[in-house]
Amino acid sequence: MKISELKAGASNVTVQGTVSQKDEPREVVTKYGKRLQVCNIVLKDESGQIPMSLWGKDIDMVGQGDTIEISNGYVNEFRGNPQLSTGKFGKIKVVSKGDGSAAPAADEPSEEDMEL
């Protein structure tokens, strides 16, 4: 699916794009008092762009310039504009890092995981 085809209310969305902007993470407090980290990004492809929020561990996994794939995502509306979300059941996969290298497979340890 292309980003230009995404409309508020769409669910079970699979889309791939490049992170063209990544803001600094910030902390938010839920109505239950839980503190969470959130970071806004902009995902773009050849057809357009859409804002998206990254939560928790996804913030460090995704960098500016990375190509990512969102599967089982949905599109909601925030301040009158469509916004992509993974929600509880969606997945983010890094297809390639911003430096052009392939992302490590999920079952392969990254360099940080390995002791040198």
Image (spheres, helix red, strand yellow):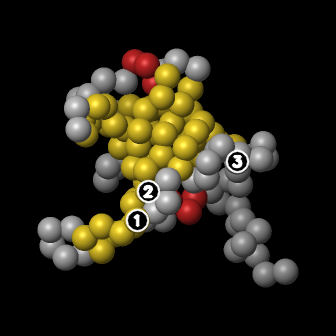
Disc 2 from disc 1: Cα separation? 6 Å
Disc 1 from disc 3: Cα separation? 23 Å
* Residue at (72, 72) in percent of width and height: 112
Q: Position of residue 34 (x, y in %)?
A: 25, 75
Amino acid tagged 1: Arg
Q: Residue furthest bottom?
A: 115
Amino acid tagged 3: Lys
SS at circle 2: strand
* Residue at (57, 58) in percent of width and height: 61
Q: Mark 2 vs mark 1: which is more N-terminal?
A: 1
SS at circle 3: loop
* Residue at (28, 31) in percent of width and height: 81
Residue at the spot of label 1: 26
SS at circle 1: strand
In the image shown, does 67 or 114 lie closer to the viewer?
67
Q: Residue furthest right?
A: 116
Q: Quadrant of residue 6?
A: top left
Residue at the spot of label 3: 97
The nearer-to-camera label among 3 and 2 is: 2
Q: Are marks 3 and 2 in contact (CB under 8 Å)?
A: no
Query: Are there few (<14), some (14-19), or many (20+) residues within 10 Å of tag 1?
Result: few
Residue 46 drawn above or below residue 105: above
Q: Are marks 2 and 1 in contact (CB under 8 Å)?
A: yes
Q: Position of residue 80 (x, y in %)?
A: 22, 32
Disc 3 from disc 2: Cα separation? 18 Å
In the rendered view of the protein, which quadrant contains the C terminus? bottom right
* Residue at (56, 63) in percent of width and height: 60
Q: Mark 1 vs mark 3: which is more N-terminal?
A: 1
